[in-house]
Amino acid sequence: MPVVSVSRMVVASTSVAPLVTLNAASTGLSGNVYAKAIDPDGVFSVPVTVNASAGNYVLELSTLSSVSTGLHTGQVVVNLYTDAACTRPQKMPSVWVNYTVNVLDSGGAWPGNHLTALSSIQGASEWATFQGNAAHTGYVPVRLDPNQFSTRWQISVPALLYYNSWCNLATVTTEGGNFYMAGNDAVTARSEYDGSTLWSYSFSGLPNPSVNPPAVSNGVVYVAAGQQSSTYMYALDAMTGSKLFQSAMSSQWEHYLAPTVGSSGVYTNAGTYGGLYAFNFQGDRLYFAGADQQSAWTPAVDANSVYVYTGDALRVFDPVLGTLKASITDTTFTNYIYIINGSAVLGAANSVFAAVYGNSNLNGGDIGNSLVHFNLVSNTVDWSIRGVYPSTPAYDSGVVYVANNNPLRLEARSEADGKLIWSCAPPASGDTRFVSEVLLTKDAVIVSTNLSTYAIDRSTHHVVWSYPSAGNLALSPRGILYIEGYSAQGSTTTLTAINVH
């Protein structure tokens, strides 16, 4: 009789659905397989879903939402049958599952540091800018095993909040074993190993000091800082924090998301009346291009173009010359607050997604917004979906994954026509809205509500792991999931590091 192990963290009063994969050839399982669990400690529910996939049978267990907080260890026996009534055993009649389930409450004690040696996840790139990459897809092409997740460390960091305390600009970027954040008019480098501070560069000496989230690429940290006549693009050495260049820009009082680095330069929103700045890697200005004045956005970039979404339109610029290649009007746009709070996302060739994410917070979400798809072959908006979309979606292989606050659910939608493929509602009664962008791997969608962070399996569409902390997300190629705590008040917040391999 085979014995497997399951380890999970789960938010109190919710359930998670661990998967156990059994190879048909090695176990002798065949035909239809039905299962039910026997757990004398009452951690797992009796029903077990079984799915056949590529020569395997995948058992989907489910913890009970009534399980008390604390650490639960035990063994559940999953009996396997050939009939739906569960009366005729399979050739292999059962599998034993040893489990460790840690049920966590948001007010509970920290589960403890686990400072394991850092090692790279094959296929993962650095989380270099907003939503990880220049296309802002939020996608990391790796598979994660929730059985390996553990708490690594937790530290207090400055809260970087803008506009009525709901637009959280404190995003994390990573490179070479370090991570970088902004706050308190400074950008700071810290060690991924334990969160300790390595260096900090302050902009407090500027006439109008402020700081925006950093991007990092090829050993250089890029950050837009300052306002009004003292606005600059800075380049800092990623290892030492020494200044490499400081290039002037114009602005009013806006804040920006992290700059986007492409093959030809560095790009950011700025300008007295809005616009796009482009710099080469020596700090020389390539160009300034006009765009509608909005706060809290960053362009998407590929080898051929720079994509600027400012609500009124998607504008496409040449990355070196700044010439306008295309402009597509968004007829769904109403300008209430001059803030985008997200970015355009590049899909397949000539495909771009965007929304005025900031409008989702107006009147408690009553006004809403639209997820819009731009077709750069026809230069049209070829579909739009009305909802309350608060944050930048993620994309992979013809599917866009987007958080919707009304109805409250994560949605997987077709790139071709926007049709809903599947959805998953957050499980806790106190979950009222999403507060993070969507992070995507090959097998999981990770997203935060106002209460917790959930990992949702892309095949079963059920929650497989959860943790009672919420905020901006990032995934390091050294196997750390960052949760930058959402805090509507106060000068500090909590940054949690989770080991994921």
Image (cartoon, rainbow, N blue to C red):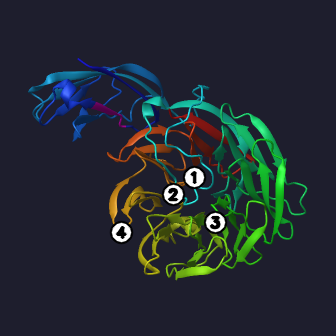
Image quarter where the N terminus lies is top left
- Mark 4 or mark 2: name the one nearer the start of the chain: 2
- In the image, 267 versus 50, the foreground residue is 267
* Placement of 207 over or under 67, stated as above or below: below
Helix, strand or loop status at disc 1: loop
Q: Position of residue 148 (x, y in %)?
A: 47, 30
Residue type at numbered disc 4: Ala
Do the residues bearing badges 4 and 2 touch, measured as CB atoms within 8 Å?
no
Q: Decide: is 91 above or below 455.
A: above
Q: Are marks 1 and 2 in contact (CB under 8 Å)?
A: yes
The residue that label 3 is drawn on is 297
Question: Which residue does the image show at 82% across and 53% down from the upper left?
Answer: 244
Residue that mark 4 sits on: 416
Measured in 3D between alpha carbons, the distance from the residue under mark 3 to the one under mark 1, in whole angstroms, is 14 Å
Of residues 331 and 486, the one drawn nearer to the viewer in this rendering: 331
Q: Amino acid at mark 2?
A: Thr
Q: Which mark is residue 137?
A: 2
What's the residue type where badge 1 is placed?
A: Gly
Residue 19 painted magenta = yes
Q: Quadrant of residue 7?
A: top left
In magenta stretch: residue 23:
no
Residue bearing the label numbered 1: 132
Number of numbered discs on residues: 4
Q: Which residues are magenta?
A: 17-21
Q: State how far apart marks 2 and 3 are (Cα).
A: 14 Å
Please report whichever mark, 3 or 1, sits nearer to the chain's N-terminal start: 1
Q: Residues within 10 Å of mark 4 (few under 14, many from 20)?
A: some
Q: Is residue 278 left or right of residue 352?
A: right
Which quadrant would residue 443 be assigned to in this image? top left
